[in-house]
Amino acid sequence: MGLFRFLFLEKKYLVHTAFGQEMRERAVSQFDAQKIAYAVVANKNDTSFGATGQSNIPLARNSSASKVQYDFYVKKEDRHRCHFN
């Protein structure tokens, strides 16, 4: 995340990280269900994948869509409300 965005992003407390589209969609539905405003930053995570496409991250192993890491940020006062199953 760029320095400017970090300094001026109102929702800047990292509360959850998801790998791949499926995990991102589950997180979004849980934020929406709890009515918590959030910001998502997507990062392509090429360094954790070997030549065979296998991930070193256990939750992301064997998933071709899991090369993207999604970081969810919320306001300070909403941090305690974020509960994920």
Image (cartoon, rainbow, N blue to C red):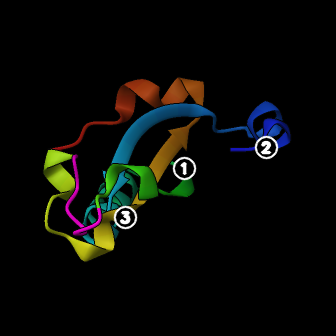
x and y, in percent, of residue 40 in the image: 54, 54
According to the picture, the residue beneath numbered tag 2 turns out to be 5
Q: At x 37% / y 64%, what residue is drawn?
A: 67
Residues at marks 3 and 2 touching, judged by CB atoms closer than 8 Å:
no
Q: Name the chief secondary structure element in magenta.
A: loop
Please state if 80 lies on the left or on the right of 56 as rendered: right
Number of the front mark, 2 or 1? 2
Q: Tell which of 57 and 17 is nearer to you.
A: 57
Which residue extends farthest front?
51
Over which residues does the magenta segment extend? Answer: 51-56
Number of the front mark, 1 or 3? 3
- Residue type at tag 2: Arg
Q: At x 54% / y 41%, what residue is drawn?
A: 73
According to the picture, the residue beneath numbered tag 3 turns out to be 67
Q: Earlier in the sequence, mark 1 or mark 3?
A: 1
Circle 3: is it few (<14), some (14-19), or many (20+) Cα within 10 Å?
many
- Residue type at tag 3: Lys
| Disc 3/disc 2 C-alpha distance (Å) | 23 Å
Circle 1: is it few (<14), some (14-19), or many (20+) Cα within 10 Å?
few
- Residue type at tag 1: Ala
Residue 70's quadrant in the figure? bottom left
Residue 50: mark in rendering: none
Q: At x 53% / y 56%, what residue is drawn?
A: 43
| Disc 1/disc 3 C-alpha distance (Å) | 25 Å
**Location of the N terminus (image quadrant):** top right
**Location of the C terminus (image quadrant):** top left
x and y, in percent, of residue 13 in the image: 55, 30
Residues at marks 1 and 3 touching, judged by CB atoms closer than 8 Å:
no
Q: At x 54% / y 25%, what residue is drawn?
A: 77
Mark 2 element type: helix
Q: Tell which of 60 and 8 is nearer to you.
A: 60
